[in-house]
Amino acid sequence: MKAQLLAVDDDPVDIKALQLLLESWDYAVDTASSGDEALAKIADAPPDLIVADVRMPGMTGLDVVTETARRHPGLPVVLITGHADVRAAVRAMRLGAFDYVLKPPDPDEFRLVLERALEHARLRRENAFLRAELSAGGAYGDRLIGRSPAMLAVFDMIERVARTDSTVLIAGETGTGKELVAQTIHFRSARHAKPLVAVNCAAVHANLIESELFGHEKGAFTGAVCARRGRFEEADGGTLLLDEIGDTTPEFQAKLLRALQEQTIERVGGSRPIPVNVRTLAATNRDLRQAVEKGSFREDLFYRLSVIELRLPPLRERREDIVALAMRFLDLYAKRYQCPAQTISDAGLACLTRRDWPGNVRELQHAVERAVVLSNRRALEPDDFPDPAARSAAVGQAAPETLQAALDATTREHVLHTLDRVGWRKTDAARILDIDRATLYRILRRFSLEKG
């Protein structure tokens, strides 16, 4: 589903321009022309994120921050401010604003700030949910599901590593549940009361990742009008998850290695070492050993990250867990959407267990969600779960002759199936495919894919 944003500005021209910009990024946008109107709308239906101008008559952007923090803790607010109001924006961050951007906002910077704010809010919700599950006595909640030997070995490894501060490299294909494993390790550790901060390294531009993780000092680069803490400092005392660590550059890897070894960081533009007490978890869907051999990943960093390596099995290697997963997702979405589906027939379950699921648990989850939403049956049948692999066969395509052609065909069909499944909402498709939107657009151009 699209993220719901509330844009607040008293200037009708500015608010319309902001709305069009946000909608062009595939957000669902509501607007308010005053702080009072914004608070009324938030009380009626809280959005995922608020974007507010600092300078407004009556209730200012700072007032919106203060009242939102009081009435709706955890709801992020991003401020838009002119150069003359930077001090007010910095003061608002102390009051609870997530971040601010200067007017007129640089589109790339603005979009990154919004994505960071939404990700931060998502993690807060998931952390609270997982903490409640664990405190209720569930070993792994309702999200890490499996009784196959492969998953029982994973659960055993989680129990062992959670009691330590060792660095863990969580490896596995896209959709196998690497972030859930990282969350479980954190919340079963002695650091569970401190923050768990996750960074998707693949989603941060190479030029910005150092500032993202280490922070920056005032004047470090154009637009750095005040000092800002990085993710290492935010995670102090807790756990830092570096997701898709294999997508970083060797230059950054050298700086990361130093930070991990010395447990100190230096902000961009700074010279003062800042000590941090952080447990690091890393996740990747790449073969880092192969990357080391090719020279795209530092060997010393690999060994520093893989003190303990926890490999998640793909779903095709634990087919005995598919039934339990499918029934869990059925129960989840039938309740959420108030749909008639209550079970999956034996034939339907057999259909699901026969598939290889290249997108793993995530693909299975979305397949069940689609079936629950679209079917009017009480018991879901095989035809409620169309196989995307059958698409190319139905078209009568000749089998590709080269390995690259086979990979291209697989990529094209998987991306097309994902886009169809989410109604061609590119932000949702990129999230499911675990790639950024720029990569998705490159794939669309390469294969000339467009909505049919």
Image (spheres, rainbow, N blue to C red):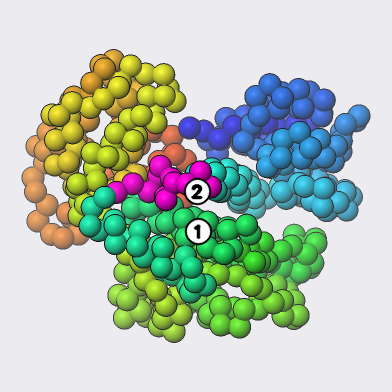
Q: Quick one: label 1, few (<14), some, or many (20+) residues within 10 Å?
A: some
Task: Determine whether, in the image, residue 196 is placed left or right of residue 297.
Answer: right
Q: Is residue 37 above or below residue 359?
A: above
Q: Does residue 102 appear in the picture of this structure? A: yes
Please tell me which residue lies in front, 176 or 400: 176
Q: Quick one: label 2, few (<14), some, or many (20+) residues within 10 Å?
A: some
Q: Is residue 207 above or below residue 333?
A: below
Q: Which residues are magenta?
A: 135-146
User: Residue 279 at x, y = what percent?
Assistant: 55, 69
Question: In the rendered structure, does residue 138 fall within the stretch colored magenta?
Answer: yes
Question: In the rendered structure, does residue 366 fall within the stretch colored magenta?
Answer: no
**Which image quarter: residue 262?**
bottom right
The residue under label 1 is: 188
**Which image quarter: residue 277?**
bottom right
Q: Which mark is residue 134?
A: 2
Residue at position x 76%, y 22% from top? Answer: 40
Residue at position x 82%, y 40% from top? Answer: 66
Amino acid at pointer 2: Leu
Question: What distance separates the C-alpha of mark 2 from that of mark 1?
Answer: 8 Å
Image quarter where the C terminus lies is top left
Amino acid at pointer 1: Arg
Task: Determine whether, in the image, residue 437 is placed left or right of residue 255.
Answer: left
Q: Which mark is residue 378?
A: none
